[in-house]
Image: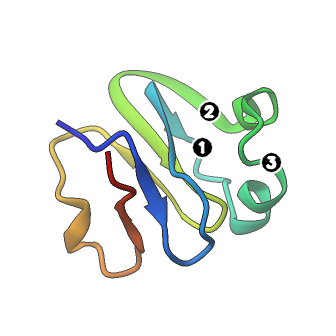
Amino acid sequence: RTCDQLRCTACDFRVSFFNDYVWDQSCDYLFFRNNMPELSKLRAKMIKKKGSRAYACQCSWRSIDELTDLQTDQQLRWVCGKH
């Protein structure tokens, strides 16, 4: 299970997630800074991959395709935004 209320403490932005997608390797900070949270613009760098999930805020992004503890990633500043 995943928290659906993740929030980034670095950019103070809600973390969006997209089931069955991964981010293209060409993604960079400016792409997310300029395009979040507009799905129509984000689709340009989304790749369909069944069973995966693409996460992003305005300053960080991850593609996950197996069970992963995001708390072990020291670069991410994502926390539960409370339910």
Q: Amino acid at mark 1?
A: Asp
Question: Dot 3: within a 10 Å radius of its alpha carbon, few (fewer than 14), some, or many (20 or more) residues?
Answer: some
Q: Which residue is mark 3?
A: 35
Classify mark 3: helix, strand or loop: helix
Q: Which residue is more in the foreground, 68 or 10?
A: 10
- Numbered label attached to residue 46: 2
Q: Amino acid at mark 3?
A: Asn
Percent coordinates x, y for residue 49 in the rendering: 42, 23
Which residue is rendered at x = 63% and y = 68% of the image? 59
Classify mark 2: helix, strand or loop: strand
- Numbered label attached to residue 24: 1
Which residue is rendered at x = 76% and y = 33% of the image? 44
Question: Dot 1: within a 10 Å radius of its alpha carbon, few (fewer than 14), some, or many (20 or more) residues?
Answer: some
Q: Amino acid at mark 2?
A: Met
Mark 3 vs mark 1, CA separation in Å: 14 Å
> Looking at the figure, which quarter contains the N terminus?
top left
